[in-house]
Image: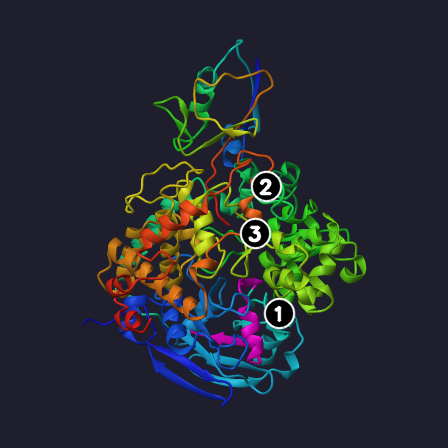
Amino acid sequence: VSPLFGYMGKLLRVDLTARTLRDEPLDEETARAFIGGSGYGTRIIHDEVPGDTDPLSPANKLVFMTGPTTATSLPTTARYEICTKSPLTNMWLDTSSSGWWARDFKMAGYDGLIVEGAADSPVYLWINDGKVEIRDASAFWGLDSDETQEAIIAELGDPKIKVACIGPAGEKLVPLACVMNDEQRAAGRGGAGAVMGSKNLKAVAVRGTMKVPVADEAKLREISKELRGRLGGHPVISQFTPYGTAFLMEHGWVSGDVPNRNWGKGVWQHGCEELNGRVMAETILKPHAGCQGCFIRCARWIKIEEGPFAMEGPGPEYETLAAFGTMLMNDDLASVCWANDLCNRYGVDTISTGSAIAFAMEAYEKGIISKEEAGCELTWGNADAIVEMVHQIGNARGLGALLGRGVKRAAEELGRGTEDYAVHVKGMEVPYHDPRAFFSQATSYATGPRGACHMHGASFVMEQGAPRPDTGIPPEVDRFDNEGKGILAMLAQDKYSVTGSMVICVMLSDGMIFADQAAVLEAVTGELWTAERIAQTGERITNLQRVFSMKCGITGADDKLPKRLLEGPDEGTHAGKVPDMAVLLPDYYRERGWDENGRPTQAKLEELGLTEIAGEF
Amino acid sequence: VQVTVGFLGGLRDQVGRPSLVVELPAEATYRDLLDCIAPAMQSSLAAWAWDREKQSFSRQMMVSRNLSADLRDETTLLADGDEILVLLPLAGG
């Protein structure tokens, strides 16, 4: 077996209960089968975390993983994945962030970090070119995520240090809490921040200067150059630079992609015209650096000169504009920016937070929640009320303490019909691409490895014509067909399983086909990679995530869309359209080689090389 | 028959304006509209947006008539005041 390039060759295992540190060699067999990132993390979580583990107990583990492309010359690769059992969904979770942190972490000598146990007082980790310390974080407990990073960098005395941390929401174990790093980059979904808080781990500070070994650097640079050229002129990817992901808002109201009023209104043209990337670019956008090594630079930096929401800092991307804009019928761009900043400082997921507030606004409108309970007039479009609810959720107080547990639990507690408009899958609030506009997305959401997710299963992008020449799928499909969508959902999920394992940005991978991913991995690792091996590796990772979630108690009966998304929109090009899950789901299971209950078969697991798991499962 | 053709997203930048107002004869079809705007589209839109062979918006474009349905059938009769919206639905974020 030839040496494996692209890895630092070791993982750091930290037991916070015993306060011990241990270097472990990277398992090359696992790296060959699962690549790295969320794939390698899947193997760790599956093998080490029993399905019945309480996600907020010391028995849960929190795994930070880079991939073989991290800290190489390939663009968009300063990313990391966090894998754990989610306190929001009580099953598999991978969540990813960009910025700069991952590059320094890997260059400090590690491919990954496994955190287990729980400290008896607040601590942070300091990883400096192979040297690791567990340090007291008592002085930083209570600081927001921006303040935490500044304070730790000041304490350690090197401005080049990068910090991933939790804000107050993670400390208070809010299940919507994220892990934040650099300029408000977030590993946002599913509550990894609460898991970190449960371990009394405030932050992981890193500084690294080591070089990542690459098998064929000249080839990798050639591939990178070709990708820059090809994708820089891509009709969609080229829009991310001037307008960010929010360019979608400018036209998404026509296709029906953008949800409004807690998914209850088909079209809100005015809102989309006030909140889109072009408007931001023409009014509040300021020049600023993107993520490390990225030529796309979708990240926004904004300055609002005056008014109650005057601020300067990172600006909202598409999902956040939908979360605090169209979902809440709020057309005030400045207040959306303010809510975004608050969420990032508290360290809560903007998608789920916006969805929880939308749910509460509908409950308020229907008289289920009173003004006294809300602490404000929780009416549609009320920017002050939106800001108040973000404070409540971030501080786990008042109504926000309930909403911060997610809409599924909030509806279970409130009852009185609120379940009908609690929009989630398996407890994960649905991100803002309407599956009634692109039916494959209904399958992707219903079966998503971490619940409803537009990252780990962006089949709507494939359905809209993203490149897929090496998949055998015809280039054109009718967005409202129910037949034949299972393969799209499966490929989108498996492609992300690879993307999250390499670990690269979806903005890049959306423009890549399997053969592109294979070429990159071959240049980096020195292994023979083909499009077929990429597809099978993605399938292997997704299946193992499914197995883990089933061990956590998930069944095929949980593969469903919420009631609200099975009601046809009232207007728009998708008016009256409803995905037929009775057709979509069996088609997907067939494509997956799963049984009629959504369970991976023994034959499928053995085909994917998961033989010992097949026997035990 | 007066029809407005709106261009959204990156198409607006390519065409150089948000919309065109087009005068067509009575009982004009979508094909008639395409023929009328073809010279302007051919000179301004990229190949991924305008199919030069078919003299039509390319298959990956979404064309909506009055925000009610996707417009594909070129024999569709247009009516006075129709608003045709053209966009590339492909997006992420």
Cα separation, mark 1 vs mark 3, equals 20 Å
Q: Does the stretch in magenta take in A336? A: no
Q: State which tag comes first along the sequence, 2 or 3.
A: 2
Q: Badge 2 local density, few (<14 within 10 Å), some, or many (20+)?
A: many
A194 part of magenta stretch: yes
Q: Secondary structure at mark 3?
A: helix
Which residue in the protein does label 2 denote? A278
Chain ID, mark 2: A
Q: Are circles 2 and 3 on residues that touch, CB within 8 Å?
A: no
Residue A384 visible? The answer is yes
Amino acid type of disc 1? Val
Nearest-to-viewer mark from 1 and 2: 1
Q: Which mark is residue A174?
A: 1
Judging by the rendered image, the residue that carries numbered circle 3 is A319
Residue interval drawn in magenta: A183-209
Residue B58 — which label?
Answer: none
Instruction: Write down the chain letter for disc 1.
Output: A
Q: Which residue is nearer to you in this view: A207 or A599? A: A599
